Amino acid sequence: MAIILSDAGHHRRLLPLTFTRPVAQLRPGIMRLSEGWERRSGLKVGYRTEGYLAAGFPLPADDAPRFEVDGSLFPSDELVGAVLNLRPGEALTAQGRVLAFGIGGREMPSEANWLHPPAYAKPIAFTGEVVRFDRPWALFQHCGKAIAQDFALLTDGRRSQPLSATDTVIGDPARIFLEEGARIEASILNTTNGPIYVGRDAEVMEGCMLRGPIALGDHAQLKMGAKVYGPSAFGPECRVGGEVNNSVILGYSNKGHDGFLGNSVLGEWCNLGADTNNSNLKNTYGEVKVFDYEQAKEAGTGLQFCGLIMGDHAKSGINTMFNTGTVVGVAANVFGGGFPPKRIHSFDWGGSATQTYDIERALAAARRVMERRGVILSKAEEEALRHVHAVDGPPR
């Protein structure tokens, strides 16, 4: 048996983060959503996603997957149990929308079937909590819930590596978990509001101040004196310094210097130059609007706090200032004086939409960046970046 994790119509709603990955590859907590489904269900997963991403994220090898699930959903124990109880021809529903299908053979729900249960499917009501990551800002909104549930799953019945005597703990020390090789020295750890998880061979350098819930992925680093307010989650190989508040970095990205990052989501292989700052609150204290790819215009978020949304491989130069609700596309290279525009196209060079980053130069830079972390740019990833360059590059 296997599970198909479907984009379920959310692909455009989550751009630019989903230009380079299926919805279920997002990481709002310690694990990717897909990893949570695998661990909690015990089943292999595959993806139903955009055609240009399918080579890198295929359907399950199993010829007869039993379940198809909305990939934007957080896999709580209760939801996973309800999905595994589905029979072919049944649809798990909540508030009029489909959460998952029990399937047989080679059935393929249409995008519309996720909005309204099809007549051929028997609806099964799900009464538990549904946490859905269907907008980029949902990652930092629900980060705390994701960390708490991932922490409980990953640490159940296990013992943390010992904490150094040089550290100061405020709250329950049992809510701190260090994987093998993790190091924390001379730092202040506050678990009053949530747990703190430090992955394998990750390091929290001297003088850091952490208020949980916080997740630090394998081989990641918090630089000396970093101030991190939870809920915040940093994926594997991230380098994070300065001040961070309620933000998610998917992995392999650097914010290694001073500067503020708040209520933001960064993709993989991003780099924020020294003293890059973002605004997360308007001077009017009004609702933050961001560029919405689905509507092709600015739209309200319903939030008072919303900072920077940045796609994979994007970079900023030193002293860059991002305005409230800025959206930066894939592989953009943002630099120059003043505030850049709030909507920056993928492969924009300079942030002013006046020059396109040459695709061959962009790919060469991506290879160099990835090789520093021992990762090779795959053919599928290269083709995906070429596709994004064609569809979301700056206007010519």
Image: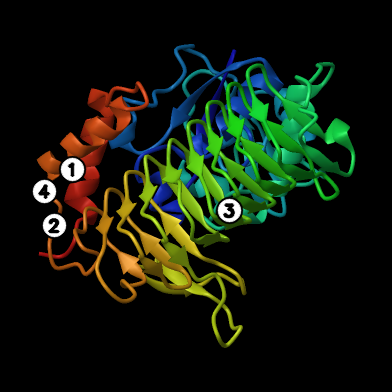
Name the residue tied to disc 4: 358
The image shows residue 258 at horizontal and vertical percentages of 49, 56
Classify 10 Å Cα crowding around label 3: few (below 14), some (14-19), many (20 and above): many
Name the residue tied to disc 1: 362
Of the two numbered discs 3 and 4 on the same chain, state the one appearing first in sequence. Answer: 3
Of the two numbered discs 1 and 3 on the same chain, state the one appearing first in sequence. Answer: 3
Decide: is 37 above or below 358.
above
Callout 2–callout 4 Cβ contact below 8 Å: yes
Viewer-proximal residue among 5 and 244: 244
The residue sitting at 78% across, 46% down in the picture is: 129
Q: Quadrant of the N terminus?
A: top right
Name the residue tied to disc 3: 247
The residue sitting at 71% across, 38% down in the picture is: 186
Q: CA distance from mark 1 to mark 4?
A: 6 Å
Q: Quadrant of the C terminus?
A: bottom left
Callout 1–callout 2 Cβ contact below 8 Å: no
**Front disc: 3 or 2:** 3
Classify 10 Å Cα crowding around label 4: few (below 14), some (14-19), many (20 and above): few
